[in-house]
Image (cartoon, rainbow, N blue to C red):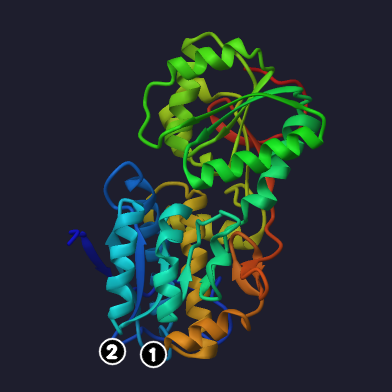
C-alpha cells in the first residue's frame, strides 16, 4: 500500500462575502462537515501547486462557511498527497470512492495523473473535477469528469496565432514536457503553427524532473530558430530560460499559460525578461470579481494571488453553489453541474458548463509579457530580450 499524507481542512471564519452567489445563508456554519476529496501534490516536484490550491480553497471556505455553509453545514476537504503521480492518484481514487463522506473529488494537478484515476471515479459515479486538467481528453473519460480548465485544444491554437501572427515568428523550436499532456499540447501547437505559415524546426521533449538542458539547447541552436515555444510549468520554464541565456541564445520565448505565476519571475530572474504567455486570470484586470478576489487574498496571505490560487478559489465557490442548488449526495452533484448557471467566477466572470464537453465556456484571456521584472499586458511592438 502507498502511504499518503492526509490533511483535513474546514476553514470557518466570518469574513465579508462579495462574490458569493444568491442563496447563501448568513451566520457561521455548524454541525457535521460535508467533505470534498482533493487529490494532488503536497510533496515532490509539484508540491508548490498543492500549496497554492490550499490557499485558494481556504479563502473560499472562509467565505462559504462564514455565511452559513451548505444548508447550515460547513464545507471541508480531505487532501491526499499524490505527488501528481498517476500510480498514487489511482490509490487515492480507490480510497475516496470507498469513503462515503466524500461527495465529489477535486484534482489531480496534472492531466495524466487525473486520467489514470478517471475509470475508478466513473465506475463509482463520483464526480472527478479536474480544475487544472487542460488535456483535451480529460472530460472524454466519462460523464463524471468535469473541468473549468480551458482545453489545450483551444489554448494552443491561440498560442500559435500569437507566436506567428503577432510576433512574426517563422522558424520555431518547441520544447515540451514529455508527458501525455505535454505531447498532446505540442502536437496541437505544431499543427496550428504550420497552418499559420510557420516552420517548426525542432521539437524536444524533456522529463518532468530534468534539470540539465544543455544538450537540448545545442540541438535547438543548430536548428536556427527565430523563436522558442515552451510547453512547460513555471519551474522548468525558468530553468530552460536561464540555460538559454547562459548559452547566449537571445530568442523570443512564448510559453503556455501553465507558466503564469509570480514564481516564474522569482525562479528565472532576468532570464525570463521578455517571455510571452497568456492567462485566463490577471490580477490587474479591472473586473470587480478580480479586484475583490485580489484584495481578499492579499489581506489573508499578504501576497498577490496567481492563476492556480484563482482556479482553486473558483472551484470551491462553484462546488458550494452546485450543492446549495442541487443537493449534497454524489448523484445530485453530478446532475447539478449541468444545471448550474452564471456562478460568479474570477476566471470566467460567470461560469456555466457546456453539458456536451463538461467544461466551462467563455474563458477570458489576456496576452502578457514579462517586462521590468513583472507580468504586464502585451501592447504590441518589438520583441526585446
* Tags 1 and 2 touching, CB below 8 Å: yes
Residue 340, position in %: x, y? 61, 81
Q: Name the quadrant containing residue 172.
A: top right
Q: Residue at 36% x, 26% y: name it.
A: 211
Q: Which mark is residue 310?
A: none
Give the mark nearer the N terminus: 1 vs 2: 2
Is 69 rendered above or below residue 49? below
Q: Who is closer to the viewer here, 220 or 330?
A: 220
Q: Residue at 53% x, 67% y: name it.
A: 141
Residue 199, position in %: x, y? 74, 25
Work out which quarter of the rendered image holds the C terminus and state it. top right
Work out which quarter of the rendered image holds the N terminus and state it. bottom left
Q: Which residue is mark 1?
A: 72
Is 365 rendered above or below residue 224? below
Q: Who is closer to the viewer here, 29 or 279?
A: 279
Residue 157, position in %: x, y? 72, 44
Residue 198 at least partly seen = yes
Q: Which mark is residue 31?
A: 2
Amino acid at each position: 500500500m502507498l502511504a499518503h499524507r492526509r490533511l483535513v481542512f474546514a476553514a470557518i471564519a466570518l469574513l465579508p462575502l462579495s462574490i458569493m452567489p444568491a442563496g447563501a445563508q448568513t451566520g457561521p456554519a455548524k454541525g457535521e462537515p460535508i467533505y470534498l476529496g482533493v487529490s494532488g501534490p503536497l510533496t515532490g516536484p509539484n508540491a508548490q501547486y498543492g500549496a497554492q490550491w490550499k490557499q485558494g480553497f481556504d479563502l473560499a471556505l472562509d467565505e462559504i462557511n462564514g455565511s452559513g455553509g451548505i444548508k447550515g453545514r460547513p464545507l471541508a476537504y480531505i487532501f491526499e498527497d499524490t505527488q501528481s503521480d498517476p500510480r498514487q492518484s489511482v490509490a487515492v481514487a480507490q480510497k475516496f470512492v470507498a469513503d462515503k463522506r466524500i461527495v465529489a473529488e477535486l484534482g489531480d494537478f496534472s492531466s495524466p495523473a487525473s486520467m489514470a484515476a478517471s475509470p475508478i471515479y466513473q465506475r463509482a459515479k463520483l464526480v472527478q473535477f479536474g480544475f487544472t486538467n487542460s488535456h483535451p481528453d480529460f472530460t472524454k473519460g466519462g460523464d463524471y469528469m468535469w473541468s473549468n480548465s480551458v482545453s489545450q485544444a483551444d489554448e494552443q491554437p491561440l498560442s500559435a496565432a500569437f507566436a506567428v501572427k503577432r510576433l512574426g515568428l517563422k522558424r520555431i523550436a518547441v520544447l515540451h514536457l514529455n508527458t501525455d499532456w505535454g505531447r498532446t499540447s505540442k502536437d496541437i501547437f505544431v499543427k496550428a503553427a504550420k497552418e499559420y505559415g510557420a516552420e517548426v524546426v525542432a521539437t524536444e521533449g524533456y522529463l518532468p524532473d530534468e534539470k540539465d538542458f544543455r544538450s537540448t539547447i545545442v540541438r535547438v541552436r543548430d536548428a536556427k530558430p527565430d523563436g522558442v515555444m515552451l510547453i512547460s510549468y513555471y519551474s522548468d520554464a525558468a530553468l530552460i530560460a536561464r540555460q538559454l541565456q547562459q548559452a547566449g541564445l537571445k530568442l523570443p520565448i512564448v510559453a503556455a499559460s501553465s507558466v503564469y505565476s509570480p514564481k516564474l519571475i522569482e525562479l528565472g530572474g532576468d532570464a525570463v525578461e521578455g517571455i510571452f504567455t497568456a492567462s485566463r486570470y490577471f490580477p490587474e484586470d479591472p473586473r470587480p470579481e478580480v479586484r475583490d478576489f485580489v484584495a481578499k487574498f492579499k489581506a489573508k496571505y499578504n501576497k498577490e494571488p496567481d492563476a492556480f490560487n484563482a482556479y482553486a478559489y473558483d472551484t470551491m465557490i462553484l462546488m458550494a453553489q452546485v450543492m446549495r442548488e442541487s443537493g449534497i449526495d454524489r448523484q445530485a452533484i453530478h446532475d447539478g453541474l449541468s444545471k448550474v448557471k452564471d456562478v460568479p467566477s474570477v476566471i470566467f466572470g460567470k461560469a456555466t458548463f457546456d453539458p456536451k464537453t463538461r467544461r466551462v465556456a467563455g474563458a477570458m484571456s489576456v496576452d502578457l509579457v514579462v517586462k521590468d521584472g513583472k507580468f504586464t499586458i502585451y501592447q504590441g511592438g518589438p520583441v526585446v530580450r
